[in-house]
Amino acid sequence: MAKLYHVPLSPFCRKVRLSLAEKKIECELIEERYWEKSTDFMRRNPAGKVPVLKIDGMTLSESSAICEYLEETCPEPSLMPKSAENRYEVRRLVSWFDDKFHHEVTSKLLYERVNKKVMGQGFPESANVKAGAKAIKFHLDYMAWLLDHRRWLAGDTMTLADFAAASHLSSLDYISDVDWNRSQIVKDWYAKIKSRPAFRSILADQIPGFRPPEHYADLDF
């Protein structure tokens, strides 16, 4: 069985978890305190980051590279379109959420509110929290614009772009940092994606010291 070394609220780990679950690849989840940089973990990934996936006799790191590997070795159900143009759009949006959204929002909200406490790094910086709360509005509006022109974020079918976005938003939703009233179309999109069987383990996550809002696991929120 495959093994995924992860942190439950990490959006990068969640993206891999969703890909594995959607493709029905059985996987053992192993929580990794990567910030402690244990010798064993640093052997698995000298970059000292999660996720790390052990599968097919290999040890894989970097979430997007892992997801592309899964797509190539287990192509059904597909999370990438067939045309080069549409694949480009998926990769562009995955990068948008894992780079721009992560830098402007996730790192300012989730990392300040949760990661600092878990890692014993002190209290949240209020300036960062305010910046993240402001930036997420722009990103939700951009998602609403995309979904006003498409059925899913990158086109007419669900792709890895949707999983990347949902991974970040679900992590933030766990700490009540998403205003779902800002856009009905984004809320409806998230309700669709969180209703998929692949999302069940994500919605079952429980982080000691942090209690999710009641709507977090509610499929009809």
Image: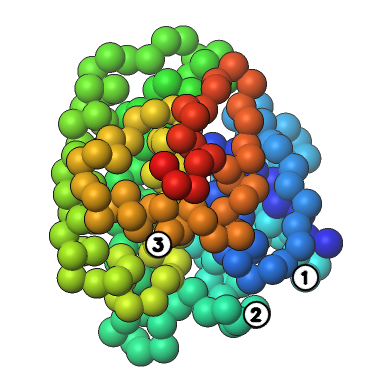
* Residue type marked 3: Asp
Judging from the image, what secondary structure is the residue with disc 2 in? helix
- Does residue 54 sit above or below 172 in this rendering? below
Give the camera-side residue of 20 and 178. 178
Q: In which quarter of the image is the C terminus?
A: top left
Q: Quadrant of residue 203?
A: top right
Residue 151: percent from left, percent from top: 30, 71
Q: Do the residues labelled 1 and 3 touch (CB within 8 Å)?
A: no
Residue positioned most to the front = 220
Q: Which amino acid does label 2 sit on?
A: Thr
Residue corresponding to mark 1: 56
User: Mark 3 = which residue?
Assistant: 162
Q: Earlier in the sequence, mark 1 or mark 2?
A: 1
Which is nearer the eye, 138 or 48?
138
Characterize the local packing of mark 2: few (<14), some (14-19) or many (20 or more) Cα atoms within 10 angstroms.
few
Give me the C-alpha separation between circle 3 and circle 2.
20 Å
Q: Which type of secondary structure does the marked residue at label 3 adopt?
A: helix
Q: Distance between the residues labelled 1 and 2?
A: 10 Å
Q: Which of marks 3 and 2 is in front?
A: 3
The count of marks equals: 3
Tell me whether circle 3 and circle 2 mark residues in contact (CB < 8 Å): no
Residue occupied by mark 2: 73
Report the mark closest to the observer, 1 or 3.
Answer: 3
- Dot placed on the residue nearer the N-terminal end, 1 or 3: 1
